[in-house]
């Protein structure tokens, strides 16, 4: 299990949500939710943002554990690159 997966699983349990209920809120399958928690899948930045919202997580911690950047940070970097490039 990955640190990110453990973080999501613990956060979900603290909110007393089943995997199925959280998956439904995120519009993903329960199997995909299980894969995230077991560390078999790292979700997209968009899904991480949805997890952050649904579980009321610390955004920076969630993205750090997933080893990803929020979409707005990526967009800002892209905009800055093309502005100076």
Image (spheres, grey):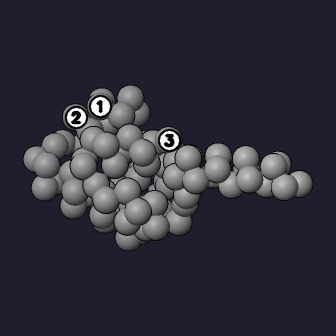
Neighbor class of circle 2 (other Cα within 10 Å; few <14, some 14-19, many 20+) is some
Residue 38 shows in the view? no
Q: Position of residue 10 (x, y in %)?
A: 21, 61
| Numbered disc in front, either 1 or 3 | 3
Residue at position x 55%, y 60% in the image: 68
Q: CA distance from mark 1 to mark 3?
A: 13 Å
Residue located beneath label 3 in the image = 46
Judge left or right: residue 64 versus residue 55. right
| Numbered disc in front, either 1 or 2 | 1
Residue 76 shows in the view? yes
Q: Position of residue 79 (x, y in %)?
A: 73, 47
Circle on res. 25: 1
Q: Position of residue 48 (x, y in %)?
A: 43, 48
Which element is circle 3 on?
helix
Residue located beneath label 2 in the image = 21
| Numbered disc in front, either 3 or 2 | 3
Q: Nearer the viewer, residue 66 or 74?
A: 74
Which of the 4 image quarters holds residue 57? bottom left
Q: Position of residue 41 (x, y in %)?
A: 49, 54
Which element is circle 2 on?
helix
In the image, residue 7 above or below residue 81: below
Neighbor class of circle 1 (other Cα within 10 Å; few <14, some 14-19, many 20+) is few
* Of callouts 1 and 3, the N-terminal one: 1
Which element is circle 1 on?
helix
Judge left or right: residue 35 versus residue 85. left
Residue at position x 74%, y 53% in the image: 80
């Amino acid at each position: 299990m990955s640190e990110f997966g453990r973080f999501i699983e613990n956060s979900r349990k603290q909110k007393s949500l089943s995997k199925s209920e959280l998956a439904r809120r995120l519009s993903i399958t329960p199997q995909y939710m299980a894969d995230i928690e077991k560390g078999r899948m790292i979700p997209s930045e968009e899904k991480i943002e949805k997890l952050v919202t649904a579980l009321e997580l610390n955004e920076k911690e969630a993205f750090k554990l997933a080893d990803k950047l929020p979409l707005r940070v990526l967009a800002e970097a892209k905009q800055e690159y093309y502005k100076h490039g």
